[in-house]
Amino acid sequence: QVQLVESGGGLVQPGGSLTLSCAVSGSSFSVNVMDWYRQTADKERDLVAAISSGSNTNYADSVKGRFTISRDNAKNTVYLQMNSLKPEDTAVYYCHAVIRIRPGGPFYSYWGQGTQVTVSS
């Protein structure tokens, strides 16, 4: 069974940095796009950053220049390096990936369990 396992959230002061990781566990044939979303109690889940299997990236305007998404295809892991964090970055961050389990099979969408990031002094 495929799962996305996240790590790296926590409490950080404004201006600080955190790195989130998300690893694909279980049997998978190929991993297509991998991305990070975030959600607060009063908002919908929004895309933060995305990276294709060929490492093309896309960022929300609010994080451009501060966050960097990267991936290690050999490890089926995606990272989100977050610098210059602001209180408004506080949210639950979710990893998402589109994965093909077997050759020629369909792609499925998977979500991580979410990790809390709190930016506060």
Image: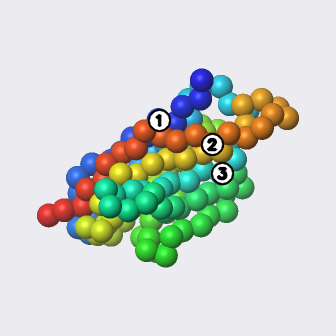
* Residue 33 image point, x, y percent: 65, 51
Which label was assigned to residue 109?
Answer: 2
| CA distance for labels 2 and 3 | 10 Å
Q: Earlier in the sequence, mark 2 or mark 3?
A: 3
Q: Which quarter of the rendering shows the C terminus?
A: bottom left
In the displayed structure, 26 sits above or below 69; it is above
Residue 4 position (above or below residue 40): above
Residue 26, label in figure: none
Q: Residues within 10 Å of mark 2 (few under 14, many from 20)?
A: few
SS of the residue under disc 1: strand
Residue 5 is tagged as 1
**Residue extending furthest toward the right:** 104
Question: Which residue is depicted at the point 45% across and 45% down?
Answer: 21
Q: Alpha carbon of mark 1 to alpha carbon of mark 3: how far?
A: 16 Å
Q: Nearer the viewer, mark 2 or mark 1?
A: 2
Q: Quadrant of the N terminus?
A: top right
- Pick whichever of labels 1 and 3 is earlier in the sequence: 1
Amino acid of disc 1: Val
Measure how far apart labels 2 and 1 are at the Cα level.
14 Å
Left or right placement of residue 105 versus residue 34 in this view: right
Percent across and percent down for residue 94 are 45, 48
Residue located 48% across and 40% down the image: 112
Q: Is residue 9 left or right of residue 21?
A: left
Q: Residue at x 59, y 67 (%)?
A: 58
Q: Which residue is mark 3?
A: 33
